[in-house]
Amino acid sequence: MIRFLVRRTVFGILVLWLISVATFLLFFVAPHDPARVITGRLATPETVALVRHRLGLDQPVLTQYGHFLNGLIHGNLGYSFYNSTSVNYLIVSRLPPTVSLALGGAIIWLVTGVLIGVLSATRARSLFDRVATIFVLTGLSMPTFLLGLLLIYLLFFRLHLAGVTWFPAGGYVPLSQNPAAWAQHMVLPWITIALVTAATYTRLTRSSLLETLSEDYIRTARAKGLSERRVIYRHGLRSAMTPVVTQFGIDVGTLLGGVIVTETVFGLGGLGQLAVQSVTNQDLPVIIGIVLLAAFFIVVSNLIVDALYAVLDPRVRLS
């Protein structure tokens, strides 16, 4: 187990290094002047030269990458000239809304998707299964921005007209400032992202559990006289969760990198909105920082998922 984790950690570090090389080549070696992009078209040559010197662009390419990599190793993601502050500060200040949205939504869609998927698999071709199929098709075809706008209209606008102020339209309140207001402002974003994503987990859980319940060891467990509930939840669901956990690790890692549409609809001001603003303003250091942070989240989440395989499925051994 320890050897596997060490090997996967080294592999993850290698992936992050390759991404850092690709990001550096894309933004600093590509045929354009990052200093000119950052300062804008109206900047004077002296300002461009100063920014170029601050970025180290007047040094050899290998020296530039050495400084770039050294900063990453020490946790320094650079300086945003557009916002006149460090990239670390920008990302840390925008991270809480994204983490709140991603983790809260993930819990809701995982519980909802797995529960509906299990009930559909154990009641295959029943009325509930057909209704669940409609839910899956609706969730897979429903754009996130449309669902978010519908929730704002129904649960905010219409209820406010009736004098009910349970759901704010948007904005973010820090958890440390007011936990109740934090949860109140996050309910609609959580529901938006959870309803769309839960459909995928319903489909994954249903298909995986149906396949698992046809295995020989499941028939053996039933032949031994075990209750159907024990067979399904103790033996079947545990093995069937492997693809669900795989998808969950990918989704959470991706969401922590920025949930652009949902954050924009509800005005949460997280990493997603920061990424959009940075691309619009061509703030290259911030873009690089968000890309590397998203890659880090995905690598870590996949490492955790790989370790969970052996816990969920006794047939899997880490070596």
Image (cartoon, helix red, strand yellow):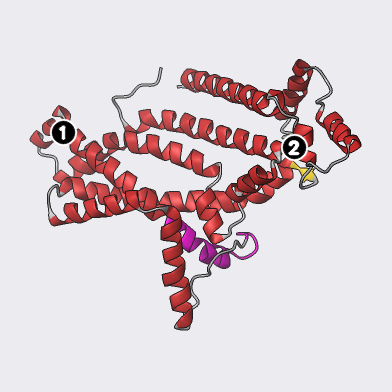
**Which sits in the foreground, 168 or 239?**
168
- Tell whether position 184 is magenta: yes
Instruction: Of the two numbered discs 2 and 1 on the same chain, state the one appearing first in sequence.
Output: 2
Q: Can residue 191 be seen in this snapshot?
A: no
Residue at 50% from the left image edge and 77% from the top image edge: 165
180 with respect to 79 (left or right): left
C-alpha separation, residue under disc 2 versus residue under disc 1: 62 Å
What residue would you read off at disc 1?
218
Say which element carries label 1: helix
Task: Judge by depth and name the residue closer to the eye, 146 or 206.
Answer: 146
Checking the image for residue 147, the label placed there is: none
Residue span colored magenta: 174-193
Looking at the image, is 48 positioned above or below residue 190? Answer: above
Indicate the position of residue 66 as horizontal and vertical percent values: 75, 20
State the image coordinates of residue 219 (x, y, percent, origin top left). Answer: 11, 33
Compared to 123, does 29 lie above or below?
A: above
Asked whether residue 311 is drawn in magenta, I would say no
The residue positioned 80% from the left and 25% from the top of the image is 57
Which amino acid type is shown beneath numbered disc 2? Val
Residue placed under numbered mark 2 in the picture: 37
Q: Which quadrant is home to the C terminus?
A: top left
Tell me the chief SS of the magenta region.
Answer: helix
Q: How crowded is mark 2: few (under 14 residues within 10 Å), some or many (20 or more)?
A: some
- Above or below, comparing residue 74 to residue 132 in the picture: above
Q: Which residue is drawn at 80% across and 17% down?
A: 60
Relative to 302, 38 lies left or right: right
- Image coords of residue 295 (percent x, y): 56, 32
Q: Position of residue 265 (x, y in %)?
A: 52, 59
Indicate the amino acid at tag 1. Ile
